[in-house]
Amino acid sequence: MELSCKSEYAVLALLELTAHFSQGEPLQIRQIAAQQSIPDRYLEQLLATLRRGGLVRSQRGAKGGYFLAREPWNITLLSALECIEGSNAQQANCEDEPKTVESAVVREIWQEARDSAHGILKNYTLQDLHDLRDKRREVNLMYYI
Amino acid sequence: MELSCKSEYAVLALLELTAHFSQGEPLQIRQIAAQQSIPDRYLEQLLATLRRGGLVRSQRGAKGGYFLAREPWNITLLSALECIEGSNAQQANCEDEPKTVESAVVREIWQEARDSAHGILKNYTLQDLHDLRDKRREVNLMYYI
DNA sequence: TGCAAACCCCACTGGGGAACCGGGATATAA
DNA sequence: TTATATCCCGGTTCCCCAGTGGGGTTTGCA
């Protein structure tokens, strides 16, 4: 799990789509990009990946754009990240088969640590994040008054 | 946290040093590399990083090699990984300052997931891994009898 | 029908890390 | 002094990230 800039962009885009979920109309790349300060040509690629992963739908042509493919409370952060980070294809050796007992033990711990992070990510849906954002907004307002 | 091939190599090397910890004599790169099937020239670099990070000591010249710098029960997996993965310096933008409320919320979850994995990694010392390996060896022996 | 808005697809760059390989300098035990 | 090790510097190949650019296709609307 990378938790990189790329992943953050993708989640931010999904959150914008979440905010417009009730409206039946699509959101355009440009608007999402402007709202979240993401380079639009780059965001386009990320949305394409999310579409191929079945997380968003798109409508082509004039007045087109993107929708969430499912309800925001049915999309976890984990599924978004797995989609966007796709198969990171382990760029070389570190062969699939551990060669020594030590190697096997180390990889079990690796897996345990990954599972732990995945557990956190699995417990947050887009709706949860959206709600957290609302709470945060209220707090910010209180400070400014 | 990468949990990559590089990190695995480093931990395997540390485990070899752990096994020889009671002996006062150093272990050479060649021997570690042979035991764990790690390219020796690559392992050399990793051990240099571990030395600069204060996890291992080295003795130069003939009959030289590497020792653990501390007792194996005082070295956690987390400290090994932080040393070997260094400051991964976030290769570009994704600027340090979140620009939107959404961005801040997302990064908090990111951090929560990272902390969760770190918690696991912090709870294992080299000695723990060494003991796990011994147990695994026993189990393997049972299968072969 | 034609135009413009939007997505779609391919390709390319520049930077950086992973995973190596190789050569030569340096320290040290024998 | 010599063999044996680490140390240090550099280069190579590959892949991913982050971003840019061009051209193609679909669609709503006048």
Image (spheres, coloured by chain):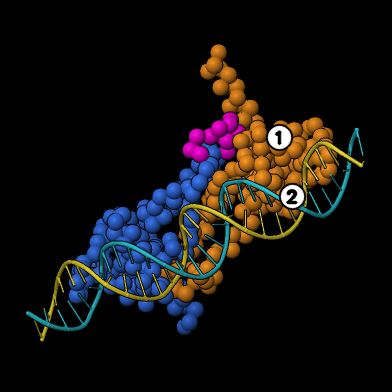
Chain colours: A blue, B orange, C cyan, D yellow
Examine the structure image and report whether residue B34 is included in the region drawn in magenta: no
**Along the line of sight, the residue nearer the viewer: B62 or A105:** B62
Residue at 48 percent across and 38 percent down: it is: A96
> The residue under label 1 is which amino acid type?
Gln
**Chain holding disc 1:** B
Coordinates of residue A143 in the picture (x, y in percent): 49, 79
Secondary structure at numbered mark 1: helix
Residue placed under numbered mark 2 in the picture: B51
Q: Could one spot residue A120 in this view of the protein?
A: no
Coordinates of residue B125 in the picture (x, y in percent): 66, 41
Residue at 66 percent across and 42 percent down: it is: B40
| A41 is higher (above) or lower (below) than B77 | below
User: Which of the marked residues, 2 or 1, is nearer the chain's N terminus?
Assistant: 1
Examine the structure image and report whether residue A96 is included in the region drawn in magenta: yes
Q: Identify the image quadrant of residue A106.
A: top right
Residue placed under numbered mark 1 in the picture: B31
Neighbour class for label 2 at 10 Å: few (<14), some, many (≥20)? some
Q: Identify the image quadrant of residue A100.
A: top right
Q: What range of the chain is rendered magenta?
A: A95-106
